[in-house]
Image (cartoon, rainbow, N blue to C red):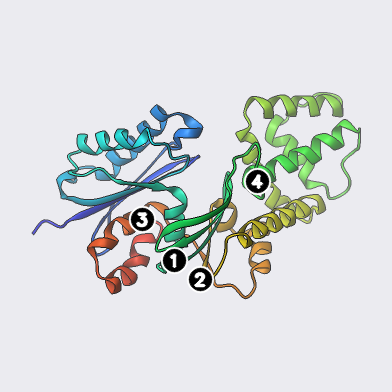
């Protein structure tokens, strides 16, 4: 007998992932593509990224075997739903995917319990309260310009701000100032102007031309903090404080799932958040595309089957 398949999509601001599973949780297809956030990158690029990942993940598998699918999309827009339906039809999949926010699958990637909270910090930052895998309250997630406190973008911007302010004031790097070197190297490499002010001006111009370069500084802030840089450590601790304050606005009971690259990777921000959440049940999100597939499969499974197969679906591929 031909096995039924379920498909999950995790389309974010930096990448798109599609995972294909049998109903027992076995992964039979997986692929990555470029960013799938229609608000950040435009509808056409987002749809093309999801289409590319879907095509690769299905491979030679028959789309007609897909009995359920779910797409979690960052920057979700209503215009994307009919585009996804057309993509699915082109691949021979009988029904369009259920279309949800990326935060829904981020929570499910860390917990099989239907009620709890999500704290996410990646490029952006948001906290949500979840009931029966539906978002019932949300805090922050207001975007890089006006919100997303404690996000990768916020962390990178704080680091760049500290460095360009010091350069503008003509301050020479202090002993142990790892952060300044990391920031300058990130933007300029070895091609550096002669004066501190000129270095600051060039960093500012490059950051304004491509603001996402600030988000890429987040990992370097963590490395600088681990190396003992006091400014980087202070930024990491402030970021953790912002994130936990955001979570407290929505969290009621149940597990707290940590998601997003800032909180799923070992580093000073994650460590400080876990410390501030002492006493809570804290879980870490696994694979979002697998979680989307699990949510798609859940109505077709018994409660016990869904719970017991959650790990199989959400464990990230090797």
Q: Are marks 1 and 2 in contact (CB under 8 Å)?
A: yes
Residue ID for mark 3: 290
Badge 2: few (under 14), some or many (20 or more) residues near its Cα, within 10 Å? some
Whichever of callouts 3 and 1 sits on the residue coming sooner in the sequence is: 1
Circle 4 SS class? helix
The answer for how far apart the CA atoms under marks 3 and 2 are is 22 Å
The answer for how far apart the CA atoms under marks 4 and 3 are is 26 Å
* Residue 22 in the figure: left or right of residue 295: left
Residue ID for mark 1: 111
The spot of residue 208 in percent (x, y) is 68, 27
Whichever of callouts 1 and 2 sits on the residue coming sooner in the sequence is: 1
* Residue 246 in the figure: left or right of residue 90: right
The spot of residue 176 in percent (x, y) is 84, 50
Q: Is residue 69 above or below residue 23?
A: above
Whichever of callouts 1 and 4 sits on the residue coming sooner in the sequence is: 1
Residue ID for mark 2: 254
Residue ID for mark 4: 218
Is residue 182 visible in the rendered image? The answer is no
Is residue 53 visible in the rendered image? The answer is yes
Circle 2 SS class? loop
* In front: label 1 or label 4: 1
Circle 3 SS class? helix
The answer for how far apart the CA atoms under marks 1 and 4 are is 26 Å
Q: In the picture, which quadrant includes the C terminus?
A: bottom left
The answer for how far apart the CA atoms under marks 1 and 2 are is 10 Å
Residue occupying image coordinates x 87% and y 41%: 173
Q: Quadrant of residue 193?
A: top right
Whichever of callouts 4 and 3 sits on the residue coming sooner in the sequence is: 4
Q: Are marks 3 and 2 in contact (CB under 8 Å)?
A: no
Q: Which mark is residue 306?
A: none
């Amino acid at each position: 007998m031909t096995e039924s398949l379920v498909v999950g999509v995790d389309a974010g601001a930096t990448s798109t992932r599609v995972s294909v599973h049998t109903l027992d949780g076995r992964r039979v297809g997986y692929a990555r593509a470029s960013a799938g956030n229609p608000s950040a990158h435009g509808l056409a690029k987002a749809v093309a990224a999801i289409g590319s990942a879907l095509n690769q993940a299905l491979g030679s598998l028959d789309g007609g075997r897909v009995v359920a699918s779910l797409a979690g999309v960052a920057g979700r827009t209503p215009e994307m739903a009919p585009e996804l339906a057309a993509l699915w039809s082109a691949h021979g999949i009988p029904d369009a995917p259920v279309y949800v926010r990326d935060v829904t699958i981020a929570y499910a990637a860390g917990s099989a319990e239907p009620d709890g909270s999500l704290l996410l910090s990646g490029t952006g930052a948001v906290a949500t309260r979840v009931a029966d895998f539906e978002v019932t309250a949300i805090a922050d997630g207001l975007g890089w310009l006006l919100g997303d406190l404690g996000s990768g973008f916020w962390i990178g911007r704080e680091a760049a701000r500290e460095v360009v302010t010091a350069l503008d004031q003509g301050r020479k790097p202090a002993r142990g100032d790892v952060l300044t070197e990391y920031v300058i190297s990130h933007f300029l490499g070895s091609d550096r102007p002669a004066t501190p002010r000129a270095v600051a001006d060039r960093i500012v111009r490059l950051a304004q031309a491509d603001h996402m370069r600030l988000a890429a500084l987040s990992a370097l802030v963590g490395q600088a903090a681990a190396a003992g840089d006091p400014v980087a450590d202070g930024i990491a601790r402030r970021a953790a404080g912002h994130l936990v304050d955001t979570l407290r606005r929505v969290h009621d009971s149940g597990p707290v799932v940590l998601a997003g690259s800032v909180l799923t990777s070992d580093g000073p921000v994650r460590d400080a958040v876990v410390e501030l959440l002492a006493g809570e049940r804290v879980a870490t999100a696994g694979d979002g595309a697998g979680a989307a597939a699990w949510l798609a499969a859940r109505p077709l499974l018994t409660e016990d089957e869904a719970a017991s197969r959650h790990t199989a679906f959400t464990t990230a591929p090797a």
